Amino acid sequence: MRAIHSTPRLVLLASLLAGGLVACQLIVGVKDDEGSVRPPDATAGDGGEEGGDVQPSCFLVKPPGPPSADSDGGDASSGTAFYALERVAIDPTGSTSAIGYDLDDRCTGLPTSTGVPGTAPCSPPDGSTRIDDADGGVDNALRGILAYAALIPTHVSADPAANFFNDDIEAGTRTLIVALRNYNGAADDTEVAVGLIASEGLAPALDVGPSPEAGPRWDGNDVWGHTGEPYLSAAGPTGLDLKGYVKNHVLVTYPHDIRLSFGAFSLNLRAASIIATIDHTATPGRLTDGTIVGRALANEFVEASGQIPVTDKLCLLSGSKTAVDLICQARDITSTPGGNPSASCDSISVGIGFRAVGAGISLAAQQAPDGGVCDAALTCSP
């Protein structure tokens, strides 16, 4: 098992959480160079609600819809293409819009044609206030939970909330791989297959690519190891069971339950989608303006966060009820699509930005993710 490294950033984060110094503030946005909010072809809907009234003054931001037919002129000879996440974005400093898309066909808290704020898709938990959507009805309560990372001065970056991911990616110790198969290589493709694979680091030195100790070069020759374990529910050995399409070079997967695994952090996302622009002009190929959206059950989010080790005896939540309450009060959506204002919100809307670079993968032996010492032992009250 990989040794657990205690960093000032994580130790201070744990102390902030345990001491209740964290404020839940919804800070909106992401810079283009940290993973854009959405591709240019993202569409604005008519503001209709799940089972509710239409709100015509609110234009919902949605991924582009599927094409009516395949385009000509593509090159499908490359087989399966693999893209390693180079950068993750949660809430970059100075950004002006939120990462993500509308997930519930509502503009919660935003003005409507009647002047009354749009209604929530479910009832907030006891003692919590309604969490309003960002412009365009974008649902992303995750950024409010992780905004406290900006309070940590020991690790300055353009997106402190994403340091947990980006530090390991830059070191080459782990990343996520987006696998794209059955793509015709053209602007439009009516059906493609997509996989999301966790890697515990660059593979041992092979005939190509740099050594793992050198870190990733992002030149198309990096080879990332993986165990072959599927990271998608009901997936086969390849893990390529997400169905999707490409519209004007924008990849969109249909909603599907997936598992987002990154080291000790492993979280199920319900009705999740992956959206990204496929850049054929770059060498190596890239996915830009990437976004992973979905719904995470609050109790599962607490459990997943509680498994992140800070030291060999201290975990991220460390049994802190204050920290858990921060997560639980961010419940803004239900775990399944279909709004019911009388139902209790049980989940947190998630929007994570990314960009990815073409790479190789290898069934190399992998070290087990850090973990095994943590037990949050706390859950959300109704």
Image (spheres, grey):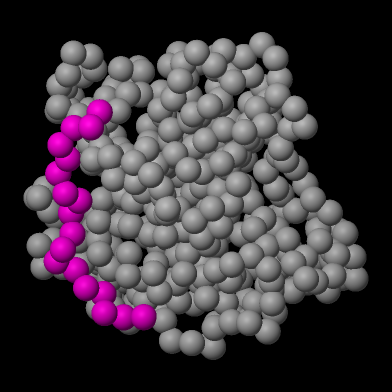
Residue at 58% in and 71% down: 334
The picture places residue 81, in percent across and down from the top left corner, at 44, 24
**365 magenta-colored:** yes
| Res. 92 visible in picture | no
Seen from the viewer's position, the closer of residues 56 and 268 is 268
Residue at 30% in and 17% down: 221
Q: Residue at the far front: name it.
A: 236
Residue at 42% in and 53% down: 234
Instruction: Give the left or right position of residue 71, taking residue 53 as reference.
Output: left
Whether residue 84 is situated above or below residue 53 in the rendered picture: above
The picture places residue 285, in percent across and down from the top left corner, at 47, 19
Whether residue 38 is situated above or below residue 351 in the rendered picture: above
Residue at 25% in and 64% down: 307
**Region of the chain picked out in magenta, as a range:** 362-379
| Res. 193 visible in picture | yes
Seen from the viewer's position, the closer of residues 140 and 146 is 140
The quarter holding residue 323 reads: bottom left
Number of labels in the image equals 0
